[in-house]
Image (cartoon, grey):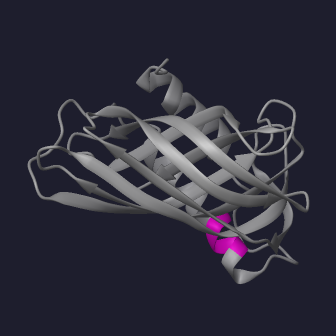
Amino acid sequence: MMRSSAALLAFAALSLSACGGGTQFGFTPEFVNLVNEADRLTTQLQPLAQTPALPAAPGATYQGVVIVADDFGTSSTGVVGTANLTANFGAPASISGTGTGFFQTALNASNNPTGTGSPVGGSLVFGATNIGTSFNLDVDGTVTIDGVPRTINGTAPTAFFGPNAEMVSGLGTDLPTDTAYTADIAIVAD
């Protein structure tokens, strides 16, 4: 079932806001960049409404942040990485992309990265066809959480935000994995 755009926006703001910000001691530069980018994107997303209609072709590219954890409600650790997406607004409209460059990190109660980030293996592939202003984004790939590679295969309800689809944000919960765990995922990009 698709979550409303308000629910997607509320989760993205909760999940990705104030990810520690700044250049704190012990953070690698790449990790600090992800933390700062998550904060910037969340601030930018908060006032935007869901896109009323897809723009005319050809399309747009988006770069942002992806966070994955076993369970956003209970997990104290997860991974954060870079999300790259390309939307084709021609008929039929579609979107594809990747999640790469992951760092294992502690997550606070708001699912924000805390402490330092340690690089971990993994990559995700995103895609959807026949999309509208909201759609289910397919998520496939493997990320390492707490030292355990988790192969994820599921969908994340996603939507475009802003009058001309300036941003894309999604939230998937309980995505199936090849382990005894499920995975939750949040994506925000502009």
> Can residue 170 be seen?
yes
Instruction: Compare residues 2 and 114 and report the one nearer the observer.
Output: 2
Q: Where does the image place residue 152, in percent across and percent down from the top left?
A: 67, 48
Q: Is residue 131 left or right of residue 106?
A: left
Q: Where does the image place residue 179, in percent across and percent down from the top left?
A: 83, 44
Tell me where residue 108 sits by quadrant: top right
Q: Where does the image place residue 4, in percent across and percent down from the top left?
A: 44, 20
Q: Where does the image place residue 24, in percent across and percent down from the top left?
A: 81, 72
The quadrant in which the C terminus is found is bottom left
Q: Is residue 29 above or below residue 3?
A: below
Look at the image and give the residue range highlighted in magenta.
31-35
Q: What residue is at 33 percent from the left and 51 percent from the top? A: 95
How many callouts does the rendering have? Answer: 0
> Can residue 47 be seen?
no
Q: Please tell me whether the stretch drawn in magenta is mainly helix, strand or loop.
A: helix
Q: Is residue 58 left or right of residue 143?
A: left
Q: What residue is at 19 percent from the left and 57 percent from the top? A: 59
Instruction: Compare residues 135 and 72 and report the one nearer the observer.
Output: 135
Q: Residue furthest bottom?
A: 29
